[in-house]
């Protein structure tokens, strides 16, 4: 297992700041989760920076609980009810999502809103270089991820009951505005590149041509793969999902190909062909073929936008860590990544004519 996989895989004892009344949860599950039977034991997943996530173990079955973090939160963030809705409806439409068992909006039960879903047994790849796989097995994993995202973007969101899940147009303008406000609300120091991006991105945004459900944080470690097959059996962490431009979703994952390893575990400077990982051109072509596109223009804008958005998200994680309610012990380190990300995003903006 690689250092990255070891750091994020599995569970740990629940952090004191994120503990809750397990008896109250068991009582709620007895009343609201069909087939639940205790006793219940609770541990915390190591991975995840935003909504704390817990493994719930009973003698007969495993569950996962995902909750809002305690403490002061940024506006509109951590909407666990939206995660519950989108996974429920996409699962019903045939998309790989865990079975949802119950949503609790009563803060009195464990202190914040939460939902419970089935635990899905499979593989999560935290290290995008897939060091534990043979060379021949790496490309099929990436192809499965590509096919799953194309599947998501091809779902008729209105027919799936998600027609009101977000606004259908002006996605980039709305997202740039949202993440600019979120960044300002969490800002702890001045970063000139972020200021320049906030000014430039709105005027550079392309027109939206298609609308679909977008995941918002689509990457390998938010997928569960079949234990032995190169097949995605569940997509997790829908906190940032909405209706939007599917190209934003696709190019967010594509960032990995243009970022250095020290930032976001990127591929830049790594001989991925020797590892059996598809090139950015191959990965893009596969997605375009699956979604009926003739290439993707203006990648520099998409990279500038997505890296800016990531920097804003990490600034929020860092701000929560200062309050002691972030869900991962490494959250404070995220603050150090914000400025390099902003500089990288501004570099792509300049390539796009900024």
Image (spheres, helix red, strand yellow):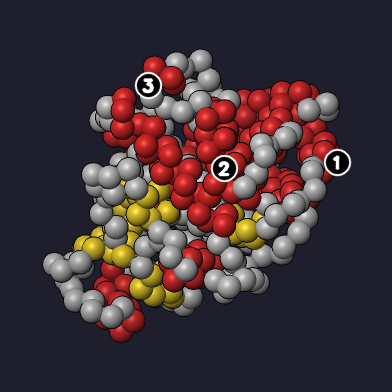
- In what quadrant of the picture does the C terminus appear? top right
Q: In the rendered structure, which disc, 1 or 2, sits on the residue that comes first in sequence? A: 1
Residue nearer the viewer, 273 or 342:
273
Circle 1 or circle 2, nearest the eye: 2
Q: Residues under labels 3 and 2: Cα distance?
A: 24 Å
Please say if 129 is above or below 103: above
Residue 84 visible, this orientation: no
Left or right: residue 137 versus residue 331 is: left
Residue where numbered disc 2 is placed:
289
- Give the class, few, some or many, for how many residues have Cα within 10 Å of label 3's Cα (few <14, many ≥20): some
Where's residue 326, x and y in %? 47, 48
**Distance CA(mark 1)–CA(mark 2):** 30 Å
Marks 1/2 in contact by CB < 8 Å: the verdict is: no
Q: Residue furthest left?
A: 59
Q: Depth check: give the residue in front, 346 or 20.
A: 346
**Circles 3 and 1: CB distance less than 8 Å?**
no
Residue 6 visible within the image = yes
Dot 1: element:
helix
- Residue 203 image label: 1
Q: Between 325 and 114, which is closer to the camera in this rendering?
A: 114
Sooner in the amino-acid sequence: mark 3 or mark 1: 1
Residue drawn at (62%, 47%), measured in percent from left and top?
292
Calculate the distance from the C-alpha at mark 3 to the C-alpha at mark 1: 39 Å
Residue topped by disc 3: 275
Q: Does 62 sit above or below residue 108?
A: above
| In the image, residue 251 above or below residue 52 | above
Tag 2 secondary structure: helix
Q: Position of residue 133 (x, y in %)?
A: 28, 30
Which residue sits at x=43%, y=19%? Answer: 273
Q: Residue at x 78, y 24 (%)?
A: 350
């Amino acid at each position: 297992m690689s250092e990255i996989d070891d750091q994020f895989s599995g569970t740990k004892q629940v952090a004191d700041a994120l503990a809750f009344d397990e008896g109250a949860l068991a009582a709620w599950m007895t009343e609201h989760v069909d087939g639940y039977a205790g006793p219940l034991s609770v541990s915390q997943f190591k991975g995840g920076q935003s909504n704390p996530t817990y493994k719930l173990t009973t003698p007969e079955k495993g569950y996962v609980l995902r909750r809002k973090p305690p403490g002061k939160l940024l506006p509109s963030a951590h909407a666990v009810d939206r995660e519950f809705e989108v996974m429920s409806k996409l699962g019903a439409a045939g998309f790989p999502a865990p079975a949802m068992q119950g949503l609790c909006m009563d803060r009195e039960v464990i202190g914040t809103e939460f939902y419970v879903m089935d635990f899905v047994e499979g593989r999560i790849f935290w290290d995008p270089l897939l060091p534990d796989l043979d060379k021949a097995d790496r490309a099929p994993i990436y192809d499965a991820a590509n096919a799953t995202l194309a599947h998501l973007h091809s779902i008729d969101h209105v027919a799936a009951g998600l027609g009101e899940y977000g606004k259908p147009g002006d996605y980039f303008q709305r997202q740039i505005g949202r993440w600019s406000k979120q960044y300002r609300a969490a800002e702890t120091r001045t970063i000139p590149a972020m200021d320049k991006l906030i000014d430039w991105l709105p005027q550079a945004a392309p027109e939206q041509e298609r609308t679909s459900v977008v995941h918002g944080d689509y990457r390998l470690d938010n997928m569960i793969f079949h234990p032995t097959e190169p097949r995605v059996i569940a997509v997790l962490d829908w906190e940032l999902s909405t209706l939007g431009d599917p190209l934003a979703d696709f190019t967010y994952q594509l960032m990995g190909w243009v970022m250095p390893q020290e930032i976001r575990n990127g591929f830049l400077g790594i001989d991925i062909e020797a590892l059996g990982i598809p090139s950015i051109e191959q990965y893009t072509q596969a997605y375009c073929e699956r979604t009926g596109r003739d290439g993707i223009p203006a990648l520099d804008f998409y990279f500038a936008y997505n890296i800016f958005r990531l920097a804003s998200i990490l600034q929020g994680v860092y701000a929560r860590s200062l309050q002691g309610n972030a869900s991962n012990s490494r959250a404070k380190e995220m603050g150090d990544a914000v400025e390099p990300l902003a500089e990288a995003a501004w570099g792509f903006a300049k390539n796009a004519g900024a």
